Image (cartoon, rainbow, N blue to C red):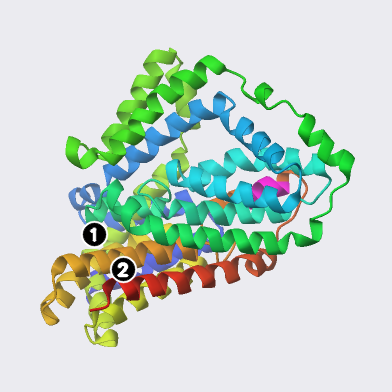
């Protein structure tokens, strides 16, 4: 190994240890690690800046602003209360409805934002029903990860993959939507099984839920109308962005700007809703991973994987699917995907050439394997995705503790079942 390779590996490993051990804030660790790659000469400043994917950052920023206005209107509280009343206060129908809606919203917004908005209302409903909120919170977190798998904007790993691979919103929806739906239905069945012991709720507790006025949750009807008038065209733009010749990031930012204009909101207030720590975490990761790519380290990793699978497309897809899921559950989906994207770029031409395969088929099989593994693998452990961590933090603030092992007891079976479904999907779709 060259000196630059050694430096890159050391900086990368030290940064990851800092992130996983929480000795330093993950954003600080990522930014410092990326900066060291530049300062120590592994990559030039120009190379590092070019590695920062602005389309990812702008898409996240635009969606955060749009969702901020939707939350301010009270929309999410209204939806949750209506669901509780639709379930007539019964735990099994309630958790089924909450999981389905959480999954659907995560596909349209993103998983972290969804749980941030649904979890507080879950506490309100479960307190009225006099049942533990923990099973609901855990399965909402997992449903958000599954639902987010279906679209380009639903989960940060998909945003990264879509930008790097040039995959459209429709490509994610049409290719991952069906298998994600099957996984979500499996999760719903598991959720109903876990809460079956709480199937009996006192009649007076159910009556309290039925008496709640959902309309009072809409705190600003005018804002809701204006927000809907912008968000609906934004989602239409996502579906048509190939035809329009516009990137999703451009559409999201344009929608955010229009909404700021028509609501006459103070931009400084709206931008407080932007998770700047998340955005700069991505900035650091982009630079950090570029430090591995520049000296040729990731190319060596790709060659090692090809040797293991003998250049076989399906074998490589399976390794990528399961490795990204299991490793992502340990170190987090976003850092893992950022690291593996350059590896997949190396794998595609090698497998296509060696097996005389259509590069388009290879392209699809590997990217979808990575997306499914990274997103669904996040359900395996508490640290697998940011949505999991957010739910645990919300529970702790409300005096409920979710341990690492308790989360695994719920999440690992769901993750394994989802991966088995995904394995069958990849084998069925790409078997030749």
Above or below residue 415? Residue 26 is: above
Q: Measuring 26% from the left and 48% from the top, which residue is drawn there?
A: 168
Q: Which of the two residues, 300 or 383, is positioned nearer the viewer here?
A: 383
The segment highlighted magenta reads 391-396
* Secondary structure at numbered mark 2: helix
Q: Which of the two residues, 88 or 400, is positioned nearer the viewer here?
A: 88
The circle drawn on residue 181 is none
Q: Which of the two residues, 168 or 18, is positioned nearer the viewer here?
A: 168
Quick one: label 1, few (<14), some, or many (20+) residues within 10 Å? few
Q: Measuring 28% from the left and 53% from the top, which residue is drawn there?
A: 171
Residue behind mark 2: 7
Give residue 88's position: percent from left, percent from top: 74, 41
Above or below residue 152? Residue 418 is: below
Left or right? Give the position of 231 relative to 106: left
Left or right? Give the position of 394 relative to 212: left
The image quadrant where one finds the C terminus is bottom left
Give residue 259's position: percent from left, percent from top: 39, 21
Disc 2 versus disc 1: distance between alpha carbons? 9 Å
Give residue 100's position: percent from left, percent from top: 56, 49
Q: Determine if residue 32 is in view.
A: no
- Residue 366 among those drawn in magenta: no
Labels 2 and 1 touching (C-beta < 8 A): yes
Quick one: label 2, few (<14), some, or many (20+) residues within 10 Å? some
Q: Measuring 63% from the left and 30% from the top, which residue is drawn there?
A: 78
The circle drawn on residue 41 is 1
**Magenta stretch, main secondary structure class:** helix
Q: Measuring 35% from the left and 47% from the top, which residue is drawn there?
A: 283
């Amino acid at each position: 190994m060259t000196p630059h390779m050694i430096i890159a590996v050391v900086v990368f490993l030290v940064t990851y240890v800092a992130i996983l051990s929480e000795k330093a804030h993950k954003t600080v660790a990522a930014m410092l690690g990326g900066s060291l790659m530049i300062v120590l000469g592994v990559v030039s400043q120009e190379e590092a800046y070019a590695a920062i994917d602005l389309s990812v950052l702008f898409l996240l920023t635009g969606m955060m602003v749009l969702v901020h206005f939707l939350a301010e209107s009270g929309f999410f509280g209204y939806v949750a209360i209506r669901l509780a009343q639709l379930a007539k206060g019964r735990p099994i129908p309630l958790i089924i409805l909450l999981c389905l809606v959480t999954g659907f919203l995560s596909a349209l917004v993103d998983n972290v934002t969804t749980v941030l908005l649904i979890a507080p209302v879950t506490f309100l409903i479960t307190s009225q029903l006099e049942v533990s909120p923990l099973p609901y919170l855990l399965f909402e977190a997992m449903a958000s990860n599954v639902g987010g798998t279906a679209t380009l904007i639903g989960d940060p790993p998909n945003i990264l993959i879509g930008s790097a691979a040039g995959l459209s919103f429709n490509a994610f929806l049409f290719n991952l939507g069906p298998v994600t739906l099957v996984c979500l239905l499996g999760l719903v069945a598991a959720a109903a099984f876990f809460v079956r012991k709480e199937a009996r709720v006192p009649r007076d507790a159910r009556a309290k839920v039925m008496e709640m006025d959902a309309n009072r949750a809409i705190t600003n009807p005018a804002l809701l109308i204006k927000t809907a008038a912008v968000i609906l065209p934004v989602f239409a733009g996502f579906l048509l962005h190939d035809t329009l010749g516009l990137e999703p990031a451009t559409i999201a930012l344009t929608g955010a700007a229009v909404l700021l204009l028509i609501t006459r909101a103070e931009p400084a207030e709206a931008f407080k809703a932007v998770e700047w720590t998340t955005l700069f975490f991505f900035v650091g990761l982009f630079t950090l991973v570029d430090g591995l790519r520049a000296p040729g380290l990731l190319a060596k990793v790709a060659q090692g994987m090809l040797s293991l699978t003998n250049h076989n497309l399906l074998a490589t897809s399976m390794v990528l699917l399961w490795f990204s899921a299991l490793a992502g559950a340990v170190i987090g989906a976003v850092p893992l995907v950022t690291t593996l994207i350059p590896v997949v770029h190396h794998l595609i031409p090698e497998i296509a050439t060696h097996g005389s395969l259509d590069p388009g088929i290879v392209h699809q099989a590997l990217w979808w394997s990575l997306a499914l593994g990274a997103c669904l693998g996040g359900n395996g452990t508490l640290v697998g995705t940011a949505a999991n961590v957010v739910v645990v933090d919300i529970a702790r603030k409300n005096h409920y503790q979710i341990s690492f092992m308790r989360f695994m007891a719920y999440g690992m079976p769901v993750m394994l079942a989802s991966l088995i479904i995904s394995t069958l999907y990849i084998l069925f779709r790409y078997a030749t």
